[in-house]
């Protein structure tokens, strides 16, 4: 494609080019080809001698280019450590920079497009960055061998210094740079034997951004300031699907600092010289909404419907049918045994990242630039390209730190990005426009973890183990609007029930999902399907263990052994041992345990819980994690601590409700979140492993809620059938 | 109407309207972007700065009431204060967005109570939300900066060398 369209030519790309490009891209996605080449047409590619992932300055300092956004998960430290390990670079001087948006070179190897999600940053980069580091090292070694006339096999590298022991010669990366930069990178660089790793897995792998994030200099989208920049706020409809009927901007335009008011597809935008003027201008707007196509659903009604449908009652909505996601044995055949039945209800949840959604866009003739925390740059390029009439690859993106995301910044519509681009297109001339959403905008805009219902009917044998498992899930699909439409079951809605070792250990399984189409935007929320499936599976298992009169840990061991779930068994045993499961809990506290696998990582947690004024208080959590090779034990611990707080916050308080289509929560006063005094102490233990690394950004999150529910079950014998624990 | 604000020890003339919250004057007019916007209604603490040494939420504080008040922001701490050193040592930040506000609240706490109890930390820090869940490290860093042994710090067992 590059031969057909040079970067200069793409600036004059026609609508037809775009249609062709988009069709090709869509087709490529559908047949599973990497669309990177197509999506990169028009991109500037200018890499140095060491390729797209490594820059080495004249001073010898190594900069690792991260294709993944850093929004808290610590991946920049891990990614840099992978390179530094293979390159034997001086870790203390390694820096990290964010990659530009070029799908061809920076695609997530698991997604085919450039993006961060599914706890995949480290795992998809593992081999790629090891090769990049090893390749660069080989170039220094060869340069030294040539210079010193010594065999390459005798050259060693340590902390950015290249040495030849026999002759006592040594040189720094800086000294060898001119020669090393001219060596052709090896095609198949030799990787280290992991037994010889000195950096990976050590406590030296710490964050590189703690200083900037402790002195106020870390740059977020909210902090972007450019000459002539305008700030925009948008008046949005109170209901999804409503449109602007008419508006009167007379008063808004009288506000000092307001520059212009535009109607855009998502509402009415007030563009001003600063944030406060934009806000005051928006308050002065008069907008009448056309609610012809507005969604007026209420979450209580939705939940009642979901319960009915799961119970086989009521009429299913049009074009909606039950779909099997796990089937085993003959479910129609009557099985002897005791019956256990239960249901669970989960509310909509807001991601509520600390930094409300925002974006900076510049649109000119044949040019567009975005400066913001882009989680899936390729999708953001595609959606921008559609609006401004360019090839996606030519949309430049500078990715900044984001103040959290938890999934919110990755959606198929690029909702807030597209909104900003629409405004910047009106403004034109590459004049920067910063779209600022208030907390209220952010919470009302949706993209929630979907409201979800589970109904289970389990038949137990005489020893209390399941012999038949009937499972029904009702939830919205997360794949609506995806360029990769999935036929049949959306796996993200059932992952965690599907593939559960408990189902593996059960001879007869009949598991189905119903995905009604509702016009309320929903999205992955840290740990995705596991946000509800982990609770359902783990809390159910504790109830079954209790019914069987067995210890929950022993009961799980039996099922894991039956299922051959050795990694589950290992984290279970480690968490049980480190928490002192076999000894009584501290006076006044009750323990609960839960185990769950998500994104290839196994997590077990033991929570110590008591009731204070009728509300659960979590004191100590012992967590065991198997994430394959541990690159940064400190950041794995940080993700367990953070994941537990995020999961506990939702479990205790998280609930978004809609009344007649209007979101009832508006800010942290009505959407309560965990605060410092409520945070448990967390101890993290990592299972030693020689497997390739898997992620830890999400897997710590879904385990805490069932661990707490199981502690409450042990405390008072009461099961938890709906979240949050604390009812408003 | 111009007024003068005392920010980080310097008198600064500002042009913003008197009802403008301090946060937007700091960020948009003075370019001090360390203090963050998180909720706009004094619920999250991301905008915390000090007013005559007391923590305030700049997002709800119109500048008209701040004449003669000494405003201190994260930028004035220099990056190397005992609290900031402890923050880096414990790798407290994750996304980092709330941390300026956290550090300003902690700065006011240690100024008032050099050896804070856990209850003191609860009281001083509960107004600052962190969605990443760095709360335990914040607590440990405050105690470290105060010269107190941090309570049970989170432990990560060192990973065994990979086998293959």
Image: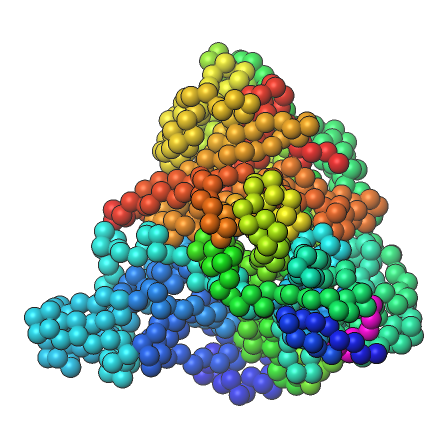
Q: Residue furthest top?
A: A462
The image quadrant of residue B74 is: bottom right
Residue A477 inside the magenta-drawn segment: no
What is the quadrant of residue A719 in the picture? top right
Q: Position of residue A618 (x, y in %)?
A: 57, 33
Instruction: Count up the numbered dots.
Output: 0
Query: As rendered, which of A36 and A701 lies closer to the eye?
Result: A701
Residue A39 spot, x, y in % from top left: 52, 72
Of residues A468 and B101, the one nearer the viewer is B101
A411 on left or right of A506: right
Please give the range of residues in magenta: B14-20
Which residue is pictured at 46% across the width and 49% down the height? Answer: B147
- The answer to whether residue B149 is visible is yes
In the rendered image, which quarter is residue A364 located in? bottom right
A153 to B99, vertically: above or below: below
Q: Is residue A515 left or right of residue A176?
A: right
Task: Say which residue appears at 53% left-offset and 13% top-offset.
Answer: A336
Q: Is residue A511 visible?
A: no
Residue B27 position (above or below residue A364): above
Q: Nearer the viewer, residue A227 or A565?
A: A227
Q: Is residue A327 left or right of residue A673?
A: left
Q: Residue drawn 30% across and 61% down?
A: A85
Q: Position of residue A480 (x, y in %)?
A: 65, 53
């Amino acid at each position: 494609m590059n031969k057909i369209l040079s970067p200069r030519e793409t600036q004059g790309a026609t609508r037809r080019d775009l249609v062709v490009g988009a069709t090709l891209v869509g087709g490529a996605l559908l047949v599973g080809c990497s669309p990177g080449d197509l999506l990169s047409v028009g991109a500037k590619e200018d890499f140095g001698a060491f390729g797209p992932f490594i820059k080495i300055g004249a001073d010898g300092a190594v900069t690792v280019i991260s294709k993944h956004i850093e929004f808290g998960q610590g991946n920049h430290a891990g990614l840099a450590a992978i390179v530094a390990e293979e390159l034997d670079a001086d870790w203390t001087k390694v820096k990290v920079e964010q990659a530009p948006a070029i799908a061809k070179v920076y695609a997530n190897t698991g997604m085919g497009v450039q993006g961060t999600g599914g706890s995949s940053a480290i795992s998809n980069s593992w081999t790629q960055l090891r090769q990049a580091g090893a390749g660069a090292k080989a170039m220094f070694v060869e340069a030294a061998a040539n210079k010193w006339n010594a065999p390459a096999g005798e050259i060693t590298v340590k902390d950015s210094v290249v040495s030849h022991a026999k002759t006592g010669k040594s040189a720094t990366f800086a000294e060898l740079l001119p020669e090393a930069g001219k060596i052709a990178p090896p095609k198949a660089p030799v990787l280290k034997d992991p037994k010889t790793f000195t950096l990976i897995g050590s406590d030296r792998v710490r964050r590189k951004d703690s200083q900037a994030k402790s002195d106020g200099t870390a740059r977020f989208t909210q902090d972007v300031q450019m000459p002539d920049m305008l700030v925009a706020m948008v008046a949005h409809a109170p209901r999804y699907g409503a449109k602007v009927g008419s508006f009167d901007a007379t008063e808004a335009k009288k506000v000092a600092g307001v520059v212009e008011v535009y109607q855009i597809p998502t509402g009415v935008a007030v563009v001003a010289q600063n944030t406060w003027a934009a806000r005051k201008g928006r308050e002065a707007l008069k907008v009448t909404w056309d609610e012809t196509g507005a969604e007026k659903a209420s979450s209580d009604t939705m939940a009642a419907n979901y319960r009915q449908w799961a119970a086989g009652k009521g009429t299913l909505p049009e074009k909606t049918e039950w779909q099997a996601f796990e089937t085993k044995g003959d479910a129609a055949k009557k099985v002897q045994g005791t019956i256990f039945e239960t249901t669970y209800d989960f509310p909509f949840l807001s991601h509520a990242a600390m930094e409300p959604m925002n974006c900076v866009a510049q649109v000119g003739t044949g040019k567009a630039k975005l400066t913001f925390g882009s989680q899936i740059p390729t999708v953001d390029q595609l959606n921008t390209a559609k609006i401004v009439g360019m090839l996606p690859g030519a949309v430049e993106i500078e990715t900044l730190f984001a103040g959290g995301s938890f999934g919110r910044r990755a959606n198929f519509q690029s909702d807030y990005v597209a909104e900003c681009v629409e405004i910047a297109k009106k403004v034109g001339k590459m004049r920067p426009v910063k779209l600022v959403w208030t907390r209220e905008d952010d919470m009302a805009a949706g993209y929630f973890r979907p409201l979800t219902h589970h109904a289970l009917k389990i038949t137990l044998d005489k020893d209390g183990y399941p012999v038949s498992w009937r499972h029904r899930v009702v939830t919205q699909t997360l794949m609506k609007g995806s360029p990769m439409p999935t036929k049949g079951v959306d796996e993200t809605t059932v992952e965690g029930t599907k593939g559960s070792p408990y189902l593996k250990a059960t001879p007869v399984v009949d598991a189905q999902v119903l995905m009604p189409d509702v016009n309320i935007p929903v999205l992955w929320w840290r740990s995705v399907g596991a946000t509800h499936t982990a609770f359902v599976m783990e809390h159910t298992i504790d109830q079954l263990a209790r019914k069987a009169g067995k210890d929950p840990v022993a009961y799980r061991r039996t099922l894991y052994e039956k299922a051959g779930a050795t990694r589950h068994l290992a984290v279970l045993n480690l968490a049980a041992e480190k928490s002192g499961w076999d000894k009584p809990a501290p006076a006044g506290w009750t323990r609960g345990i839960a185990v769950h696998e998500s994104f290839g990582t196994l997590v077990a947690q033991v929570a110590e819980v008591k009731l204070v004024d009728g509300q659960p208080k979590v004191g100590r959590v012992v967590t065991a994690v198997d994430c394959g090779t541990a690159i940064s034990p400190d950041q794995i611990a940080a993700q367990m601590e953070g994941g537990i707080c995020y999961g506990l916050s939702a479990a205790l308080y998280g609930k978004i409700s809609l009344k007649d289509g209007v979101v009832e929560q508006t800010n942290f006063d009505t959407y309560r979140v965990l605060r410092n005094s409520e945070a448990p102490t967390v101890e993290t233990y990592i299972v030693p492993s020689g497997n390739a690394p898997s992620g830890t950004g999400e897997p710590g999150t879904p385990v805490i809620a069932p661990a707490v529910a199981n502690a409450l079950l042990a405390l008072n014998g009461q099961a938890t059938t709906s979240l949050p624990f604390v009812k408003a | 109407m111009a007024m003068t604000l005392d920010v980080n020890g310097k008198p600064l003339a500002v042009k913003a309207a008197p009802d403008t919250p301090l946060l937007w004057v700091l960020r948009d007019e003075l370019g001090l972007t360390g203090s963050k916007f998180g909720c706009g209604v004094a619920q999250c603490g991301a905008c915390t700065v000090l007013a005559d040494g007391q923590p305030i939420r700049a997002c709800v504080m119109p500048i008209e009431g701040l004449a003669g008040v000494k405003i201190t922001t994260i930028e004035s701490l220099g990056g190397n204060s005992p609290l900031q050193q402890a923050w880096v040592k414990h790798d407290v930040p994750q996304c980092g967005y709330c941390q300026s506000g956290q550090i300003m609240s902690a700065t006011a706490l240690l100024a008032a109570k050099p050896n804070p109890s856990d209850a003191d930390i609860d009281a001083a820090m509960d107004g600052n939300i962190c969605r990443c869940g760095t709360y335990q490290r914040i607590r440990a860093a405050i105690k470290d900066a105060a010269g107190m042994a941090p309570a049970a710090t989170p432990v990560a067992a060192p990973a065994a060398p990979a086998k293959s």
